[in-house]
Amino acid sequence: MKKISKAINTIFLLVVTLFSYQLIAQNTSDSIDTFINAKMTQLQIPGIQLAIIKNGKLDKLTNYGFASIEHKVPTNSKTTFSINSMTKAFVGVAVMQLQEQGKLNVNNPISSYISDIPENWKSITIKQLLSNVSGLPNNIDEREQVLGGGLESKNWETVKKLPMEFKSGEKFSYNQTGYYILGRIINSLSGKDFTQFIEENQFKPSNMVSTRFGDSSDIIPNNSNSYSTIFNDGGKWINDGKLHNSYTSFPLFFRTATGIISTSEDLSKWLISLQEGKLLKNKESINQMFTTTKLNNGEIGGFNKLTNGYALGWPTVEREEHPAVAPVGGMRSTLFVYPKDSLSIVVLKNLQGSNPEWFVDEIAGYYFPDMKVKNGFGLSKNLKLLRQNLIKNKYQNPYNVYRKLYQANQNYSLKEDEVNTWGYQLLEQNKKNEALQVFKLNTLLFPKSWNVYDSYGEILETLGNRKEAIINYRKSLELNPDNTNARKYLDDKK
């Protein structure tokens, strides 16, 4: 009887454990769905595809909203989206495949593989092309239109006559010319068009059944409509907050820079194939491809404070906690690979200008809670230390808390913009009193900054303290007479 009882208890524990795991997984999934739906409302996103890979397996695949608003067509797993510049990651893989085949070396100059180039281009390396540090003139104009009217020969002859933007390796500058050259090198070394080479060596081995090269001029089954809230006016992107139909045209020769249409499920298959060694045989090839390129001075360069580096076709997120490689495309699509966490997240959207890369970390936070903004993720080491001590002190006397930290370490310092950003994060989390204390602290830390008084005035007004708000807006205007926000507020309150 004892043995039977013990066996029953063991089975019971296994059932409870399995049920608990399923419940946690379900709760995680439900929480992510709630988060995504809230983001869609906030950013007016018509449709989203989400895929999450955990430990080498597809953990979540969900569709939200509409592929077509006009025809009320729901987004489904077969809906395709343009991934724009995420295409460059496929080019990175293609180049590394050719390197594994012994046909090129990324550290070699491009003159080893292409001849009709200006003399001052000949020492530029393939690696510099892939990582956007070449200094080459761009083959698109300030409106992002392809030079030469979209004709390859005219585009090539035009761009060759333009001066170099800077000495190769001196800085990061996003560049499409380099990827056109990479396409020509792939064509030459593979003996076939780069589109065919990528299809045969990446799409097919990964069983990417819905993925192809294309643009708005192609008739593609299940393709999502494309929308935008932004437009380019004389080289400047303007967001008017209204939904517009968006159309894109990518000449064939330009499609190494931006030309793939795919689904989140297909991209998941591609990532899993990459991780399993089906696309690149040597793990070192992936490590090399994911390693951020350093500039001549040893520093790194990237798009912004999030995607702050660039590797071989892959933008990178360089940071101590949860680093990532993160291709982005069209200000509407992205995938994040967290190599140390065995986690990958794909977000495809049909709204240009909604930049999903800025909230992918928050999705990852449902798997790793320390990645949640509400738990301090993204704050600098010094700001995290201040946060921990403020929480202990219930946000009372924040300046005294800061002074104690400074007295303990004379090198302890904070930056005005990071404190301000944290204040707005607290405000977004509806922690208004905590945000008030943080904005007030910033005025004490940086008393000569007009911006800190403007932000402090804003939250004082939010909390109904108009008298103090007016005082701080006046102080901001004294420091910066051109502060139109403060001037408008004060004029409205007269």
Image (tube, rainbow, N blue to C red):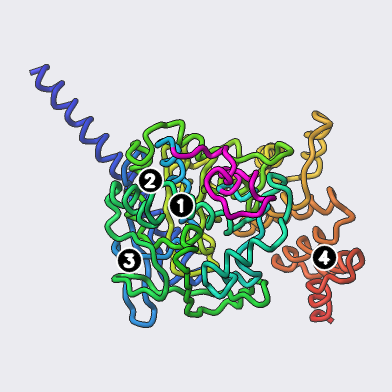
Q: Nearer the viewer, mark 3 or mark 4?
A: 3
Q: Earlier in the sequence, mark 3 or mark 1?
A: 3
Q: Amino acid at mark 1?
A: Leu
**Which residue was labeled with disc 4?**
468
Q: Nearer the viewer, mark 4 or mark 2?
A: 2
Query: Which class describes the residues within 10 Å of circle 2: few (<14), some (14-19), or many (20+)?
Result: many
Q: Is residue 350 magenta?
A: no
Q: For marks 3 and 4, give the CA distance.
A: 53 Å
Identify the residue shown where x is 57% and y is 37%: 107
Q: Considering depth in this image, is 343 or 384 the residue closer to the camera?
A: 343
Q: Earlier in the sequence, mark 1 or mark 4?
A: 1
Q: Amino acid at mark 4?
A: Glu
Q: For marks 3 and 2, give the CA distance.
A: 19 Å
**Which residue was labeled with disc 3?**
79
**Which residue was labeled with disc 2?**
271
Find residue 410 and report its image quarter. Answer: top right
Provide the residue span drawn in magenta. 103-129
